[in-house]
Amino acid sequence: HAFRWTASTGMQDLRSLLQAAGVHTADGWVTIDTAAGVSADGTIIVGFGQNPRTKQNRFGVNTPFRVVLPVQ
């Protein structure tokens, strides 16, 4: 389960941060589970999430993402 931590806000769920920033692309994803890289100020995050299952992909598809969040 991917999250962002800052001294001022503490631990925040990455999916909730995306939704609050108006990014709804990953709303239907099963998980946003890997934050593989984070910028020093915590505003740019890259990682992987899992898209929903389909007939072609019984377990979903791990999909990369890159997001730029506002500074907090």
Image (cartoon, rainbow, N blue to C red):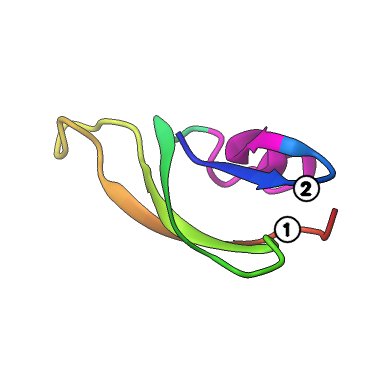
Q: Which residue is drawn at 78% across and 46% down?
A: 7
Q: Which residue is drawn at 15% across and 30% down?
A: 58
For the record, the magenta segment spans 11-27
Residue 21: image tag: 2
Residue 36 in sight: yes
Marks 1/2 in contact by CB < 8 Å: the verdict is yes
Spatial CA span between label 1 and label 2 = 7 Å
Crowd tier of the residue under label 2, counting other residues whose Cα lies within 10 Å: few below 14, some 14–19, many 20 or above? few
**Relative height, residue 34 to residue 15 (above, below):** below
Which mark sits nearer the N-terminus, 1 or 2?
A: 2
- Of residues 8 and 18, the one drawn nearer to the viewer in this rendering: 8
Residue type at mark 2: give it.
Ala
Residue type at mark 1: give it.
Leu
**Relative height, residue 53 to residue 9 (above, below):** above
Image location (x, y in percent) of residue 24: 64, 43
Image location (x, y in percent) of residue 26: 53, 42
Residue 66 in sight: no
Q: Does the magenta stretch include residue 14?
A: yes
Q: Can you tell which quarter of the image residue 39 is in?
A: bottom right
